Image (cartoon, rainbow, N blue to C red):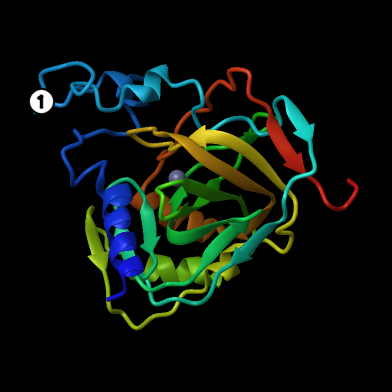
Amino acid sequence: MKMKSVFLGIVLLFVLCVPFSFAGPHWTHEEQADWGGIEDPAQTEVPLMYPYAVCSIGDHQSPVDLAADNQTEKLNNLKIKYYPDEPVFFNTGHAVQVNTSLDYKGRLKVGKEVYPLIQFHFHEPSEHVVNQEVFPAELHFVHVRENGKIAVLGVLIREGAENATLQTILDNMPYAPEEENADTGIKIDPLSLLPQNRKDYYALAGSLTTPPCSEGVNWYVLAEPITVSESQLGQLKDYYSNNARDVQDLNGRSVSNKKMHNH
Ligand SMILES: [Zn+2]
């Protein structure tokens, strides 16, 4: 196994499992207002006692209203280099998630920075809103660089035509929390979960939207939504409903807006 794969494996474990498999205490979306105050019974001293404190005291938190304090800027093009993969279908206990294979080459390139795609997962309803409009769902492609830097590509989801790739994901997703379905031989092409327009996007410095709410996450949310069918939204809800964090204050940040097509 190549060093890169080993490293990504470790990052993967860390990023994906912190909320439930590592020492982190249990959390739910229902109690999101109190995430910052959740105590880790294994710790006795501040700040270790409050592993999710930044959820409450952080000032660069996600999600946000993407239309609030918007600035149209000359930003880098997003170079989304995804390829078909034979992934692991993972029910995290909080979301329907797809983990890319360890030797997966798919990546997001922003300027000179290259972020390997580690996993993608769904929220119902959306976490980001646009001018207070909540979308039926949202998809997050999570990329982690070898230095640990995280970039998330967000895709808003409307109700409309069915998405065949989402159906494959739903058909292979375990129902039991924290269970995975690996070695299925089934290929998924993440590109088929993206809209036609991959040029226009919102950019913001934010955070993970689930505990530990770590900041320093670069967010890129595509302006054009994709569609999934009413039935597929229902199937997503059968797994997790309301697994979305409330909109957070910008606290002086502005959302950058990349528009290529003069509209
Ligand atoms: Zn997410």
In this picture, is 71 found above or below 236? above
Residue beneath disc 1: 41
- The residue positioned 47% from the left and 61% from the top of the image is 116
Q: Amino acid at mark 1?
A: Pro
In this picture, is 107 found above or below 239? below
Quadrant housing residue 176: bottom left
- The residue positioned 44% from the left and 76% from the top of the image is 85
Quadrant housing residue 22: top left
Q: Is residue 138 visible?
A: no
Counting from the top left corner in percent of width and height, residue 9 is at: 29, 62
Q: Would residue 238 appear left or right of 226 to someone viewing this image?
A: left
Q: Secondary structure at mark 1?
A: loop
- The residue positioned 25% from the left and 27% from the top of the image is 51
Counting from the top left corner in percent of width and height, residue 175 is at: 26, 59
- Quarter containing the N terminus: bottom left
Counting from the top left corner in percent of width and height, residue 7 is at: 31, 61
